[in-house]
Image (cartoon, rainbow, N blue to C red):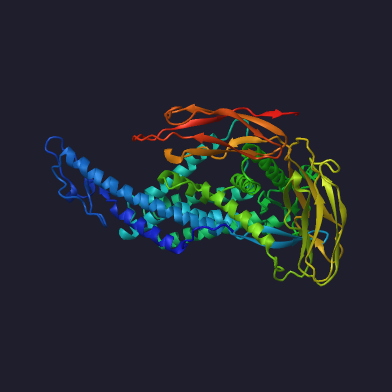
């Protein structure tokens, strides 16, 4: 797992409450002169009623309040404004921590085993928290905590008499969500695109409860007990909240009456099982046969629209990144591809709340943490594969499962042979056999790799077998290609598990190369004399290549600060590095820092293609 800064949600919540209290206490309640004769002052000329502020719970009213000049009013207003702004920033920071804690809690995942129709088992990753329940409880609490706490604090401080602050914040927030947020969500959809409600049943349930909430509040505040809320009304209103969550959960999980309606699950791009709406029979019959679904009884049919889509996206991302960053090694490219896929994944409400707060407060971009997580995830996978005592059988797992580990290999064309690893988990007491066979993708057997098929035998107690695949190395430049290795015909009592198809990506190394300076900026002292500037050759080293170079004046001048250079670098076949010797002129007098440039020209192949 990714290494992240630990914090205590309980501490964050407590600090959040304290700061919210402070914010509410500094807000002075304004009482109109008509409500209290003692608080009214009348100007002799205009008979215009002033408003007077009551004492705050922490910050007192700035006395005197009468006969203030315009400058006094502005100065006092600025003091109160900056005090509120300071506390607002504090609340925003703690809200960020609070929402981050909620994000950690609701995104928790676990591995479960599901059995397919043919008895074959598959390990899938599911969320511990139901998405609907999380959105209606913790997510709602985190995003609305400031309004809720302000309302509670004010109502308690005013002896359960409604004030101006609490109801106003809640009504304002609800109106903003209802009108502004929905309007923006509709407005930002690009032309020609559509967005659909993911859980239509849940939407109908929550929409019904939302409308009922407004009707209920109107009844208790204007009809049943006008201007007053009795205890029984408040208690009943509170009970409507768990009722909303329960009915939404029932609709989401298709319990009770919903269990008679077909349901499906699918695996998203990160391999997490999520529920999807039922589709018509016609649509279901036309679906890609590779789609993985889990039926109502928990059986898993062989997948993989999302799995294959994720696989293709990873391959495509790796190819594009290799073209864009040829100087990076394979491990860096894998991390960048992983990060790119994670950036495309769905984000929770908490994620966007945290992101908005951090941008507003200038506290950094949460997307940077995704890069750290991608690097950590990839490092953990590789470290795990290097362990001698690999995964122990999952607790209470009596079945024997066979699968590739890992399910993706990336190799250079010049690798020759590489090793593929197949493991089994669970009951190791019996002997098991499984067939494997290579399948063409964009790479073809015979021209890009040597096709191979065979049978692996796991003796009792053996949990791992390996076999070699040979890659054909030629001198022809090609695009990066891939092929597959598939497991099949596993013997009883074992079953195949995911991934039972491994992807092998072949990176071509027959390019003449991409030439660049080892570093863009170089800083040196003039006493260095001769400085060797490295020029490196990336992404292939085939053939003999000529690369012209020359120096160019900047604030430093040739002949005065450095010796002008113009020439050619000759890279022999498979040579990947050359140096340019720069002569720096040392002067006896003081001079400020100056700079000049070294340019590389277009490379030219020598003696053939």
| Camera sees residue 226 | no
Image: 516 above or below 94: above
Residue 443 x, y percent position in the rendering = 80, 41
Q: Is residue 366 left or right of residue 476?
A: left
Q: Which residue ends up furthest to the left in the rendered image?
A: 44
Q: Is residue 27 left or right of residue 566?
A: left
| Camera sees residue 408 | yes
How many tags in the picture? 0
Q: Nearer the viewer, residue 206 or 331?
A: 331
**Residue in the picture at 21% in, 50% down:** 36
Residue 42 x, y percent position in the rendering = 15, 42
**Residue in the picture at 72% in, 62% down:** 113
Q: Nearer the viewer, residue 301 or 164?
A: 301
Residue 354 x, y percent position in the rendering = 48, 49
**Residue in the picture at 55% in, 53% down:** 135
Rendered image quadrant of residue 196: top right
Rendered image quadrant of residue 382: bottom right
**Residue in the picture at 52% in, 47% down:** 368
């Amino acid at each position: 797992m990714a290494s992240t800064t630990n914090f205590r949600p309980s501490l964050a919540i407590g600090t959040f409450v304290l700061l919210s209290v402070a914010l509410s206490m500094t807000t002075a309640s304004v009482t109109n002169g008509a409500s209290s004769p003692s608080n009214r002052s009348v100007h002799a000329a205009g008979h215009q009623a002033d408003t007077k502020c009551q004492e705050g719970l922490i910050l007192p009213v700035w006395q005197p309040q009468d006969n203030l000049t315009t400058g006094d009013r502005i100065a006092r207003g600025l003091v109160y404004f900056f005090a509120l702004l300071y506390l607002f920033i504090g609340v925003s920071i703690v809200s960020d921590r609070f929402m981050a804690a909620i994000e950690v809690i609701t995104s928790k995942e676990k591995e479960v085993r599901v059995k397919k129709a043919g008895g074959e088992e598959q390990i899938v990753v599911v969320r511990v928290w139901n998405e609907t329940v999380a959105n209606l409880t913790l997510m709602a609490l985190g995003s609305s905590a400031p309004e809720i706490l302000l309302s509670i604090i004010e109502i308690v401080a005013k002896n359960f008499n409604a004030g101006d602050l609490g109801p106003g914040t809640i009504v304002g927030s609800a109106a903003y969500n209802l009108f502004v947020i929905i309007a923006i969500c509709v407005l930002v959809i690009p032309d020609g695109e559509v967005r659909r409600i993911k859980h239509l049943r849940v939407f109908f349930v929550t929409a019904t409860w939302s409308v009922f909430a407004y009707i209920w509040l109107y009844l208790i505040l204007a009809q049943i007990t006008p201007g007053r809320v009795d205890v029984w009304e408040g208690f009943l209103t509170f009970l409507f909240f768990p009722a909303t969550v329960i009915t939404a959960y029932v609709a989401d999980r298709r319990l009770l009456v919903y269990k008679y309606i077909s349901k499906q699950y699918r695996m998203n791009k990160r391999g997490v099982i999520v529920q999807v709406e039922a589709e018509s029979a016609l649509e279901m019959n036309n679906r890609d046969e590779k789609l993985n679904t889990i039926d109502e009884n928990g059986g898993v049919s062989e997948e993989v629209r999302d799995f294959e889509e994720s696989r293709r996206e990873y391959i495509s991302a790796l190819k594009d990144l290799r073209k864009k960053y040829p100087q990076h090694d394979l491990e860096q490219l894998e991390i960048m591809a992983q990060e790119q896929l994670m950036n495309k994944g769905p984000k929770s409400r908490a994620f966007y709340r945290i992101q908005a707060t951090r941008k507003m407060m200038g506290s950094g971009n949460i997307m940077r943490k995704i890069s750290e997580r991608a690097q950590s995830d990839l490092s953990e996978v590789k470290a795990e594969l290097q362990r001698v005592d690999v995964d122990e059988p999952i607790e209470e797992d009596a079945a024997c499962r066979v699968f590739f580990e890992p399910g993706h290999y990336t190799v250079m064309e010049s690798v020759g042979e590489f090793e593929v690893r197949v493991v089994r988990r669970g009951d190791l007491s019996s002997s098991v056999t499984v067939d494997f066979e290579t399948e063409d993708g964009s790479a073809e057997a015979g021209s890009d790799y040597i096709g191979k098929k065979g049978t692996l035998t796991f003796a009792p107690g053996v949990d791992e077998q390996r076999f070699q695949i040979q890659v054909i190395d030629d001198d022809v430049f090609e695009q990066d290609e891939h092929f597959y290795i598939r497991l099949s015909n596993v013997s009883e009592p074992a079953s195949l598990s995911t991934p039972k198809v491994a992807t092998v990506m072949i990176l071509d190394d027959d390019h003449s190369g991409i030439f660049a300076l080892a570093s863009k900026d170089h800083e040196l002292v003039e006493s260095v004399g001769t400085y060797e500037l490295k020029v490196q050759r990336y992404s292939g080293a085939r053939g003999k290549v000529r690369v012209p170079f020359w120096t160019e004046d900047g604030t430093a001048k040739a002949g005065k600060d450095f010796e002008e250079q113009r020439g050619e670098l000759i890279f022999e076949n498979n040579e990947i590095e050359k140096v340019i010797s720069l002569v720096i002129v040392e002067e006896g007098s003081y001079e400020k820092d100056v700079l000049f440039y070294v340019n590389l020209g277009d490379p030219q192949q020598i003696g053939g293609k």
